[in-house]
Image: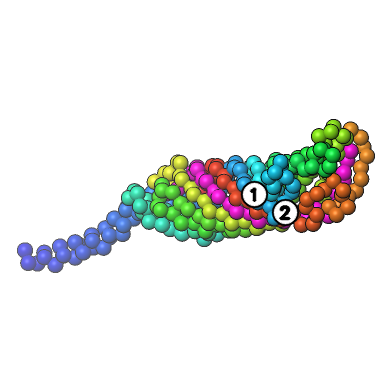
Amino acid sequence: MIRFNRPIQTIALLVMLVGAPVTTAFAQDVEPAELPTLFSVKASAGYGLGRARQMYGHDGSSEVWWSTGQGAKLNLALDLPIIPVDVVDSLGSNSGTVPVVGLELEAASGYHLSTGGTTNDPIGGGVFQTTTRTTSYIPVTLGLNARTSFGGGLPSIYIGAGGGVWIVGTYQEDVSFSDHSTGFTRKMHPPIPFGLYGAIGFELPLMYDPNDANSMFDLFAEVRLTEMTTYVYEYDAVTNGTSNTVSLDPLSDPSQPYPRDAARSASNVSLSIGFKYNLY
């Protein structure tokens, strides 16, 4: 019996050395794959409340401070991860860690329509001049988002900042008079305005898969502060019902009581709600 003791020990040692990698490999094979986000597409709709730097006129006895950022907003964005960060899965699933985007580049566009700022100003003889303003923009912005997550399948919060240009689609003011005199339309031709924004957002995963440690669709809400300045140096005043056009500017227009300077700076705070598709 003593003679066979050493060979048995040797065989047992070899089994342990060979079996350890096999056991480890098996454990790795059964763990779910962690799939990082390649890119995300966001679509949302919202509304903005604005505040202009200049007074545009009066509505009765109330002053009207109108911002071109006030109105409906449709937004579309593409997010590209720059710095992925692994966060421990607080749901306790077998996925272990969750690949979460720590920093992402966001390119965005959309369609912003502002309808508001109607003023009624007295021009003498009991006659009032009514001005109705309509402005639409197509923003083209680039920014960065920094994100933190509460874990796999749980909400995340992000903050972002960026800037860009707002391509002018429509910028006009329709002027009419209470005595039914012939009105006209100011058709502005401003340079493309530049703006800056800051944002804070909240995202909720809708289709979280513990095996992938990711979610294909998210619901998100975002609050954004935008600061933008538009310069109006000249515009065409077109008489209603005719083709008569006169080139004017804020200083030479006798029917332009407010404002008189070319710069029209405005800020607005908007709330948007939408869906986010993550490709991973």
- Name the residue: 51% across, 45% down: 220
Of residues 133 and 213, the one nearer the viewer is: 133
The structure residue drawn at horizontal position 26% and vertical position 58%, both measured from the top left corner, is 19
Label 1 to label 2, Cα distance in Å?
A: 12 Å
Disc 2 secondary structure class: loop
Q: Nearer the viewer, residue 85 or 247?
A: 247
**Is residue 220 in the magenta section?**
yes
**Residue identifier under label 1:** 50
Q: Position of residue 184 (x, y in %)?
A: 86, 39
Give percent across and percent down for residue 68.
70, 48
4 vs 65, left or right, is: left
Report x, y in % for residue 76: 62, 45
> For mark 2, what is the residue?
54
Mark 1 residue crowding within 10 angstroms, few (<14) / some (14–19) / many (20+): many
Question: x, y percentage for residue 181?
Answer: 87, 34
Can you say which quadrant of the picture contains the N terminus? Answer: bottom left
Q: Nearer the viewer, residue 257 or 218?
A: 257
Residue at 80% x, 54% y is 260
Q: Give the label, 1 or 2, closer to the camera.
A: 2
Q: For the magenta stretch, what is the residue range?
A: 213-240
Q: Amino acid at mark 2?
A: Gln
Mark 1 residue type: Gly
One can see residue 141 in this view: no
Name the chief secondary structure element in magenta. strand
